């Protein structure tokens, strides 16, 4: 019977070279994420949260340990062979939006569906639905350089969701936005999470985002520190991320 | 024998018989020895300039001879083989003798060599004889189309049967060379009538019998003995 | 989608794409101009060699080439009339010309020189039109003892039109013959060494000099050079006792020129190709490096390496097609302008006459230019595409 867990990490370690030295980014991490969770990975810069996010997103490989995604052990599979897994199961949202500049909003959102070889009519329905969902139905024909930061991130969100993934990873999704826009984006993400039961994992040091998360996974110096409940006060959250 | 043949074949007037007879005597006088050697001194005169060369000729019969180049020093070691229908030259720098084509025989001294050794009786028929002073003038026609000069006009001293002058004509009737014979055949002066002022003088000396084996007159033997 | 992406990415950086296209266009234009010049040169040399000198086919008596003859025309054609009639029945044949080549001595009364004569039928020789008369007139019909003398030989013989020379050679039977000839005209072929020995005389005069009715060879001229092989077989089937040689076997100089030019232009072509490849590859590589983060994003989203390569190669192909079309158009335009411009070039080695610059535009050259542009651009994009596909996602995403 398929478990309710979307992703499991067991004793995962990762280091990377820095000049002639090797820096240990993660030490034997154990982590399980269940379907539908809205998780914040919190920690100071250099704590390893981005590295952890990359491993979860299957765009990097651990030195040691096991990673199981959607009941499939992907540890041994080389990254480039995981492309179809990422395409079908994962969605990505970036701090710098990372839209393809030569494509319109519509086409950017459409791209993952083209990778899946979805027929045209179905594609069109999906793209329009998600553009509407993020409130950009009228901006479909515009190119990224014609959109504001908030609008671009919405396109990115629509693009991440259009394949109806099981897990969406977002690295500092609100870092390049002003606080008002960031708040709107967060509302959107929470809405989608509730509506679709898609798992969201963010890495962030935005306290308001941390406050919105059901579960906060803290990292410090490459190790987990999973203590505070989602209901921790804003103030406490601020303290903890100092 | 040749004389008899001529009489039988040419039932012509007296002159024709005389012509053939005269010719026979001319050749007898010119080629007294069946196998011989002779030194030849050749001077080529062009206007006021002149060049000399020396050869030693070994002959057998009237149509086979080997010419050894003696002087100038630059020509030493060269040999010429002259047969009836062909001429070969051997150069020390080459590994084998080179055949000289009829065309090449037109040029230089090879053409004078041809003139000097013309065998009137064998190659020509006497078509007419006239008298002119001390000489018979014979009109000779080549017997074969392959003979170099199609026609020759020959002046022969009546008393000695020695030729004094010969005019050589080609097929078209053009007069090409004139030979003057003197010193009982030991001196021949040949004028090139296409280039007036150009004369070749051939002086023969020490004509003596010499044993020349037949095999000497083959192209393979040329230069090897 | 790949096409859409490719085209839009090409337009993304207009200036860079323009530069790349310019390089490709230069390459294509170069190929078209050089190729067309070469083609024109070959064509002109071929036709002038054939029509002015050797004919499309040459007919000899069977056994001519194997024979070693010591006498002139030993292997000549005995009765050319019947053979000519049969050959001229073929509508592909434009005309036939009888010839004899002979050597001998020519004398002006003071000195002799060797000469090489081509004995021709005067009206046919005029049709061939291969020498330029610098003095006097062409060989008149009917006069068998008028000759044309090469400029070098005329100078050495101090001869001018109206003077008489004596030519001497051996007849077909081996005896000597000589003929007085009148210099009708002096000619230049453009090849200095040839003009120092050359004589042209009427074939009737040569036959008289050689004491024969034979001819050495029959030149056959066709309407169209492309029909050579067909005409060859047709004649071989209908006429017996002959050997036939095609112009290609008789034109070593032409083949040498072809080989030389092909060698030179081949080398130049390789150099141009290398320059274009490096230039285009460099441009696409810069584009790849600029789009590093974009590449990382695409890979994160699940774009396979193969698809990523296809994207960049697609850009290469797109540039190749656009560049190829532009290049062919530019080349065609430039060639047309040059052809109307009547540019004169200096004489090539061994010749004394200059000629007009003309670029031959033939579909194969244009298609080749397009294909080379296309292939070059595509090949140039391969290394950058490989580089893009081998990027590590994490590093690419972290790139500025």
Image (tube, grey):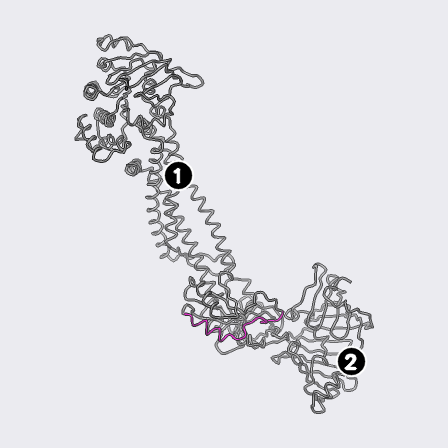
* Local secondary structure at mark 2: helix
| Residue pointed to by mark 2 | B28
Q: Is residue C184 left or right of residue C394?
A: right
* Local secondary structure at mark 1: helix
* Residue that lies at the very extreme toward the front in this rendered image: A1
Chain under numbered label 1: C
Q: Nearer the viewer, residue C380 or A159?
A: A159
Q: Classify the position of the C terminus of chain C by image quarter.
A: top left
Q: Alpha carbon of mark 1 to alpha carbon of mark 2: how far?
A: 95 Å
Q: Note whether C349 is above or below C271 in the view shown.
A: below
Is residue C124 something that shows in the picture?
A: yes
Q: Position of residue C77 (x, y in %)?
A: 54, 72
| Residue pointed to by mark 1 | C380
Task: Tell me, for residue A202, which label it has, or none.
Answer: none
Is residue C125 something that shows in the picture?
A: no
Chain under numbered label 2: B
* Residue that lies at the very extreme toward the bottom in this rendered image: B13
User: How many residues crowd mark 1 within 10 Å: few (<14), some (14–19), many (20+)?
Assistant: many
Q: Which residues are magenta?
A: C70-90
Q: Is residue A90 left or right of residue B95?
A: left
Q: Position of residue A185 (x, y in %)?
A: 21, 21
Q: Position of residue C124 (x, y in %)?
A: 46, 72
């Amino acid at each position: 019977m398929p478990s309710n867990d979307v992703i499991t990490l067991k004793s995962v370690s990762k280091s990377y070279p820095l000049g002639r030295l090797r820096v240990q980014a993660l030490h034997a991490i154990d982590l399980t994420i269940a379907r539908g969770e809205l998780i914040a990975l919190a920690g100071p810069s250099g704590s390893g949260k981005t590295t952890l996010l990359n491993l979860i997103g299957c765009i990097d490989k651990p030195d040691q340990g096991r990673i199981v995604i959607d009941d499939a052990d992907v540890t041994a599979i080389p990254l480039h062979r995981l492309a179809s897994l990422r395409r079908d199961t994962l969605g990505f949202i970036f701090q710098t939006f990372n839209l393809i500049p030569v494509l319109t909003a519509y086409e950017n959102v459409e791209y993952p569906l083209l990778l899946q070889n979805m027929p045209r009519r179905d594609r069109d329905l999906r793209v329009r639905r998600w553009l509407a969902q993020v409130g950009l139905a009228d901006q479909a024909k515009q190119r990224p350089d014609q959109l504001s930061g908030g609008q671009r991130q919405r396109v990115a969100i629509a693009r991440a969701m259009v394949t109806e993934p099981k897990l969406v990873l977002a690295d500092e999704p609100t870092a390049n936005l002003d606080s008002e826009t960031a708040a709107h984006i967060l509302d959107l993400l929470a809405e989608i999470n509730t509506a679709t039961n898609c798992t969201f994992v963010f890495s962030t040091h935005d306290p308001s985002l941390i406050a919105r998360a059901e579960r906060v996974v803290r990292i410090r110096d490459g190790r987990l520190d999973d203590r505070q409940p989602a209901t921790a006060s804003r103030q406490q959250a601020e303290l903890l991320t100092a | 024998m040749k004389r008899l043949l001529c009489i039988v074949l040419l039932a012509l007037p007296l002159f024709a018989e005389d012509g053939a007879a005269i010719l026979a005597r001319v050749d007898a006088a010119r080629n007294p020895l069946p196998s011989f050697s002779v030194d030849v001194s050749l001077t080529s005169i062009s206007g006021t300039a002149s060049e000399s060369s020396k050869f030693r000729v070994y002959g057998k019969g009237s149509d086979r001879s080997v010419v050894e180049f003696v002087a100038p020093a630059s020509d030493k070691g060269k040999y010429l083989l002259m047969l009836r229908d062909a001429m070969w030259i051997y150069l020390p720098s080459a590994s084998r003798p080179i055949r000289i084509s009829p065309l090449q025989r037109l040029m230089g001294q090879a053409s004078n060599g041809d003139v000097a050794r013309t065998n009137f009786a064998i190659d020509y028929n006497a078509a007419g004889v006239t008298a002119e002073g001390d000489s018979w003038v014979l009109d000779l026609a080549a017997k074969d189309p392959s003979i170099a000069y199609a026609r020759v006009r020959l002046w022969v001293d009546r008393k000695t049967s020695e030729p004094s002058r010969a005019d050589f004509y080609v097929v078209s009737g053009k007069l090409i060379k004139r030979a003057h014979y003197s010193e009982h055949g030991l001196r021949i002066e040949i004028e090139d009538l296409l280039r007036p002022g150009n004369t070749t003088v051939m002086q023969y000396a020490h004509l003596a019998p010499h044993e020349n084996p037949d095999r000497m007159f083959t192209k393979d033997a040329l230069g090897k003995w | 989608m790949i096409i859409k992406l490719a085209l839009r990415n090409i337009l993304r950086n207009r200036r860079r794409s323009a530069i790349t296209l310019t390089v490709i266009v230069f390459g294509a234009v170069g190929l078209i101009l050089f190729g067309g010049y070469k083609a024109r040169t070959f064509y002109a040399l071929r036709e002038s060699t054939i029509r002015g000198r050797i004919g499309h086919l040459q007919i000899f008596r069977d056994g001519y080439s194997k024979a070693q003859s010591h006498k002139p025309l030993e292997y000549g054609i005995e009765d050319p009339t019947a053979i000519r009639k049969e050959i001229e029945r073929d509508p592909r044949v434009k005309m036939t010309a009888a010839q004899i080549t002979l050597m001998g001595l020519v004398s002006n009364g003071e000195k002799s020189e060797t000469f090489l004569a081509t004995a021709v039928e005067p009206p046919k020789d005029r049709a061939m039109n291969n020498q330029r008369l610098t003095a006097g007139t062409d060989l008149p019909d009917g006069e068998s003892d008028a000759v044309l003398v090469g400029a070098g030989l005329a100078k050495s013989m101090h001869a001018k039109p109206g003077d008489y020379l004596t030519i001497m050679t051996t007849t077909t039977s081996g005896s000597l013959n000589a003929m007085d000839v009148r210099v009708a005209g002096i000619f230049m072929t453009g090849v200095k060494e040839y003009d120092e020995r050359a004589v042209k005389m009427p074939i009737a005069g040569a036959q008289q000099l050689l004491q024969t009715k034979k001819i050495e060879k029959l030149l056959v001229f066709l309407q169209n050079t492309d029909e050579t092989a067909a005409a060859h077989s047709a004649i071989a089937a209908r006429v017996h006792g002959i050997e036939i040689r095609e112009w290609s076997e008789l034109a070593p100089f032409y083949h040498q020129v072809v080989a030389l030019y092909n060698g030179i232009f081949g080398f130049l072509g390789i150099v141009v190709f290398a320059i274009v490849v490096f230039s285009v590859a460099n441009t696409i590589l810069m584009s790849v490096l600029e789009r590093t983060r974009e590449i990382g994003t695409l890979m994160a989203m699940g774009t396979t390496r193969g698809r990523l390569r296809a994207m960049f190669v697609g850009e290469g192909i797109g540039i190749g097609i656009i560049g190829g079309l532009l290049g062919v158009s530019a080349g065609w335009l430039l060639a047309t302008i040059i052809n109307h411009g009547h540019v004169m070039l200096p004489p090539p080695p061994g010749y004394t006459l200059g000629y007009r610059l003309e670029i031959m535009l033939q579909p194969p050259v244009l298609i080749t230019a397009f294909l080379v542009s296309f292939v070059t651009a595509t090949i140039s994009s391969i290394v950058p595409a490989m580089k893009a596909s081998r990027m590590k996602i994490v590093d690419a995403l972290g790139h500025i």
